[in-house]
Image (cartoon, coloured by chain):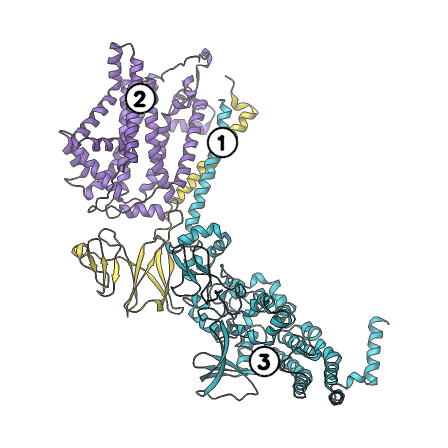
Chain colours: A yellow, B cyan, C purple
């Protein structure tokens, strides 16, 4: 059988194949290497505008949404601001603020939380769970409230 | 299949694979950009809007996406969302929105800027609706039932009262299946600086901060102001372009740090040239640190008013509620704490009304204080001797205009009215009225504005030269002509007055230069042109 | 590349590493039957290639994965959203596992319908069948590691199924769970199976599988109307066949990348032992068994699965037994194959569309 690799066409084909394979698998290799390089171990977040300080009455709670659409309950007290993930630690239902009762309430299993997020009744109370908190940045000069939320790309959203 | 064919296929597939991997890398970098705050955030609230409008109004959404608003997740509903009962609102795809975003909407976040703007000179630009300028557009250029000149001209800079179309019963007309209220096309689109909005607020922020990119760079560039501050009656942008300041700006735009986020401080972020914003509103460095600009009070650093028939130095009286009023130097200043009747204009039931309100004086800024604030910016580049001498040059020019032309012409016009030769109620009846109008409103202003911003040609050829030429050649003859038209006796009276005027030292040159001056001039031309 | 007499370095290396390179050259020169130019005869190489992809991406993922119930979900989440190219590597791993199942099944179908498992290759069929089981176990344990609601409850159902196997069932279930109930031990066990035990087994069985092929030689097949001349009945392993495999390899990588881009591996809600989701579904390659479970009872379905598996496992011998008794073995084999495959397909689709 004639060896096709030695003809002009064969050399061209082999060269193209070699270049293609090396660049493609090389790129894959670089991406794999970047994957393994420990660079961003901190969860990546970004600030989201959450209104003006004046929008938050002291003692009141306002609902905003993070980038994934999850409600976040922001409560203002004399001491400052606290942002609670509205996801109930029990089964992930969304809790809401009940101003008359001064508590967060989960309708699924009647979970109740104090204004500071600590569960006191229902399954979360029994399990000693509390609402998880999110970080905030308060710009006193501009009078603006920012919420630190997980940065989510459009691809995953 | 031959071996070579296989090899070619492997090569082809490899390149396809490589292309796919590049898309992977792009996705990864996009996610990175989102996390770094370089990609817009479409929050759940605004996703519905963006989904449609990304194709419905593609460029608008593109602009928003690159804006600071987009980056921080301030989206459509945050600005366009409306409350039940707002006249301009309607239910659009399940959300109550309004097409008009007013300063009050912006004030949801930008409170300081709103308050500064609301009491600024800019916010009162819409009050021109009662001025002579507007009469010219409505009457001279317009006709009954067609105010298009005012709509397309004056109001696009000055703003107007936004009105709604109504039926004969006064009910709002609505259109489309969503019952959108119909805005009177004579009043909107309008991005005039002093627009009267249905919610009671004044102005429109996007007059300077163009939608939907809301770029700070645009508002810092001179072209932005040049949309309105131009033309025969106030050619500020032309003067700026002619000035050393403008030349420096265009030559060094890349050193201007125009895209600086937050405060844009002369002497810290840039120093290549001043723009309109630099001198009139922005912050600058001083030996004591940053002088924070009162960023939305355009008139604060102005010590002369160069617009009226006769220029005045102006003191600023601020009242306890934030209302501000310029007091010409000639007017006695009240004391702090005095209750003073003030005149303000407002839109009531979609009509402009004037009312007198008693207000308490909170503070007084003298014209000297205002000038000091302006000088602070000058001193970033120039020494005090330079700046002081400049102001002397400028003051002299204004004084020259006032004393030689402004005051005498105004006195003559007043006297013509007193003599019954012209009527205040008919501002453009006689030839002399047109001449006088342009004398102060066009040429006189050009001269004064030219001097204020170092535009030599506008000061002289477009300014004082025109003032002088028309004063001698048109205005004075027109005064006599108007008087003669009224009665021979008045004609004689005014002939005598003008003759007496021209005998004054500043005017004797008209009837002839001195022999020495004439000889020197002839000599000069002979030397220069060999003629 | 044997030690050259005049090459100093080459000779030194040959002394340090006394390997007979001729063996490799000889192995590479092995003639390959002509019919392997047809693409469907390369299906056996495909799972092999994908296995390498899985090992590579799998090792990469273990850099970040934390096999503990408290951190498993969060670490997968971190891989998906935070680590550079994490979503891509994970998606490749996920898609490659699915490809692998498909490739193994296709390979089996080819071997079955060409009856390539006959004497003397019965043993290799059985090794191959074990590899199928291994592949599915890989998929099952791997998915469980994600520790989201569906994968957690999928694992629960599976261990309950194992429990129903007669005699040894409870012991197997006990072993898998690391206790009487699913608990913190279960995840660690699944993890160790997935990255330690199964890969070792797979490597061993794969080697045996290939070794057996080489020892028996590839089945030579001829097709009607296609009588290649004697000198063209074979072609070389290198470079001809290797190039074909390269072609398939790059094509696979391309498809995997495209799928990873369009359908990246998702992440559901975190596992919650107290809440059973309304619809539990295993991975699609268990659909047939899951549907069987719903059609019959737990006991019957387990026995039925065992029986079907047994038949498949020992099929070469059943085939031989049939051959001795019937003239129409070819027809019987085709009918059995078609019925089995359609049955599998039907149950899978049924389960897929049922909700």
Q: Position of residue C26 (x, y in %)?
A: 40, 20
Quadrant in the rendering for residue B483: bottom right
Kindly give the residue lying farthest to the front in the view shown.
Answer: B168
Regarding residue B33, the answer to whether it shows in the image is: no
Residue C328, compared with residue B404, is above or below; it is above
Residue C317, compared with residue C283, is above or below; it is above
* Relative side of C302 to A65, left or right: left
In primary-sequence order, the first of circles 1 and 3 is 1
Mark linked to residue B11: 1
Helix, strand or loop at mark 2? helix
Q: Residue at x 25, y 51 (%)?
A: A92
Quadrant in the rendering for residue B437: bottom right
Helix, strand or loop at mark 1? helix
Residue B443, compared with residue C314, is above or below; it is below
Chain at numbered mark 1: B
Q: Which residue is mark 2?
A: C338
Q: Position of residue C143 (x, y in %)?
A: 28, 39
Chain at numbered mark 2: C
Q: CA distance from mark 2 to mark 3?
A: 98 Å
């Amino acid at each position: 059988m004639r060896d096709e690799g030695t003809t002009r066409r064969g050399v061209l084909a082999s060269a193209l194949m070699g270049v293609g394979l090396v660049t493609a698998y090389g790129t894959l290799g670089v991406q794999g290497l970047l994957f393994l390089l420990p660079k961003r171990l901190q969860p990546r977040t970004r600030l989201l505008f959450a209104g003006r300080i004046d929008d938050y009455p002291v003692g009141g709670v306002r609902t905003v949404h993070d980038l994934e659409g999850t409600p976040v309950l922001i409560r203002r007290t004399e001491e400052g601001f606290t942002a609670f993930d509205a996801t109930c630690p029990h089964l992930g239902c969304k809790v809401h603020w009940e101003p008359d009762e001064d508590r967060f309430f989960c309708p699924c299993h009647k979970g109740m939380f104090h204004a500071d997020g600590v569960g006191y009744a229902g399954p979360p109370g029994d399990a000693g769970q509390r609402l998880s908190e999110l970080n905030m940045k308060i710009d006193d000069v501009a009078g603006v409230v920012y919420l630190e939320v997980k940065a989510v790309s459009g691809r995953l959203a | 299949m031959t071996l070579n064919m296989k090899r070619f296929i492997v090569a082809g597939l490899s390149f396809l694979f490589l292309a796919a991997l590049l898309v992977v890398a792009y996705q990864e970098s996009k996610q990175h950009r989102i996390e770094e705050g370089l990609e817009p955030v479409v929050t759940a609230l605004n996703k519905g809007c963006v989904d449609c409008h990304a194709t419905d109004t593609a460029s608008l959404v593109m602009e928003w996406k690159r804006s600071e608003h987009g980056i921080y997740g301030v989206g459509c509903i945050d600005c366009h969302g409306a409350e039940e009962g707002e006249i301009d609102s309607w239910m659009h795809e399940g959300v109550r929105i309004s097409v008009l975003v007013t300063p009050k909407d912006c004030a949801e976040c930008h409170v300081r800027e709103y308050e500064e703007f609301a009491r600024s000179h800019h916010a009162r630009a819409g009050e021109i609706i009662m001025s002579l300028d507007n009469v010219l557009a409505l009457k001279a250029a317009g006709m009954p039932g067609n105010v298009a000149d005012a709509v397309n001209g004056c109001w696009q800079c000055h703003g107007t009262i936004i009105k709604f179309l109504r039926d004969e019963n006064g009910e709002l007309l609505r259109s489309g299946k969503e019952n959108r209220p119909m805005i009177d096309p004579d009043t909107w689109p309008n991005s005039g600086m002093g627009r009267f909005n249905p919610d009671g607020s004044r102005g429109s922020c996007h007059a300077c901060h163009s939608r939907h990119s809301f770029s700070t760079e645009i508002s810092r560039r001179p072209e932005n102001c040049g949309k309105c501050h131009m033309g025969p009656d106030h050619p500020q942008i032309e003067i700026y372009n002619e000035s050393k300041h403008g030349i420096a700006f265009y030559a060094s735009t890349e050193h201007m740090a125009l895209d600086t986020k937050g405060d844009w401080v002369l002497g810290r972020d840039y120093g290549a040239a001043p723009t309109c914003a630099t001198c009139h509103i922005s912050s600058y460095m001083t030996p004591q640190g940053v002088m924070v600009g009162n960023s939305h009070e355009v008139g604060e650093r102005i010590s002369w008013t160069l617009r009226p028939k006769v220029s005045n130095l102006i003191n600023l009286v601020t009242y306890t509620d934030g209302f501000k009023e310029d007091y010409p130097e000639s007017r006695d200043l009240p004391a702090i704490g005095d209750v003073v009747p003030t005149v303000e204009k407002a839109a009531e039931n979609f009509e402009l009304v004037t009312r007198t309100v008693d207000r308490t004086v909170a503070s007084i800024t003298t014209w000297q204080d205002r000038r000091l604030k302006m000088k602070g910016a000058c001193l970033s580049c120039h020494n005090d001797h330079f700046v002081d001498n400049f102001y002397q040059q400028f003051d002299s020019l204004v004084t020259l205009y006032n004393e030689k032309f402004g005051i005498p012409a105004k006195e003559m016009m007043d006297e013509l009215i007193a003599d019954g030769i012209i009527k205040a109620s008919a501002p453009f009846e006689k030839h002399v009225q047109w001449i006088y109008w342009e004398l102060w409103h066009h040429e006189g202003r050009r001269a004064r504005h030219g001097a204020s911003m170092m535009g030599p040609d506008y000061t002289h050829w477009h300014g004082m030269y025109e003032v002088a030429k028309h004063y001698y050649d048109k205005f004075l003859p027109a005064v006599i002509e108007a008087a003669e038209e009224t009665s021979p006796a008045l004609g004689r009276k005014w002939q005598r007055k003008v003759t007496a005027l021209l005998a004054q030292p500043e005017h004797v040159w008209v009837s002839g230069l001195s022999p020495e001056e004439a000889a020197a001039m002839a000599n000069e031309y002979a030397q220069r042109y060999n003629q | 590349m044997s030690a050259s007499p005049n090459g100093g370095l080459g000779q030194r290396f040959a002394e340090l590493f006394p390997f007979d390179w001729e063996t490799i050259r000889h192995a590479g020169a092995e003639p390959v039957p002509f019919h392997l130019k047809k693409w469907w005869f390369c299906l056996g190489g495909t799972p092999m290639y994908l296995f390498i992809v899985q090992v590579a991406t799998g090792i990469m993922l273990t850099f970040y994965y934390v096999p503990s119930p408290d951190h498993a979900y969060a670490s997968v989440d971190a891989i998906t959203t935070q680590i550079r190219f994490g979503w891509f590597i994970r998606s490749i791993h996920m898609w490659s596992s699915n490809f692998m199942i498909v490739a193994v099944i296709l390979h089996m179908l080819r071997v079955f319908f060409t009856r390539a498992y006959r004497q003397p290759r019965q043993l290799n069929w059985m090794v191959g069948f074990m590899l199928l089981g291994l592949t599915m176990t890989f998929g099952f344990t791997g998915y469980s590691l994600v520790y989201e609601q569906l994968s957690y409850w999928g694992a629960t159902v599976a261990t309950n199924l194992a429990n129903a196997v007669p005699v040894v069932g409870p012991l197997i279930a006990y072993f898998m769970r690391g206790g009487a109930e699913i608990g913190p031990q279960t995840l660690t066990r699944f993890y160790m199976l997935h990255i330690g035990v199964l890969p070792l087994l797979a490597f061993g069985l794969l080697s045996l599988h290939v070794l057996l092929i080489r020892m028996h030689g590839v089945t030579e097949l001829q097709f009607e109307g296609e009588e290649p001349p004697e000198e063209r009945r074979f072609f070389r392993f290198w470079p001809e066949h290797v190039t074909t495999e390269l072609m398939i390899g790059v094509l696979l990588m391309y498809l995997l990348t495209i799928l990873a881009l369009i359908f990246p591996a998702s992440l559901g809600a975190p596992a919650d032992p107290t809440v059973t989701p309304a619809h539990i579904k295993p991975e699609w390659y268990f659909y047939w068994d899951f549907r069987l479970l719903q059609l019959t009872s737990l006991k019957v379905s387990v026995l039925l699965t065992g029986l079907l598996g047994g038949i498949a496992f020992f099929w070469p011998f059943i085939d031989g037994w049939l051959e001795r008794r019937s003239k129409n073995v070819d027809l019987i084999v085709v009918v059995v194959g078609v019925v089995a495959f359609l049955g599998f397909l039907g149950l899978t689709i049924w389960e897929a569309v049922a909700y």
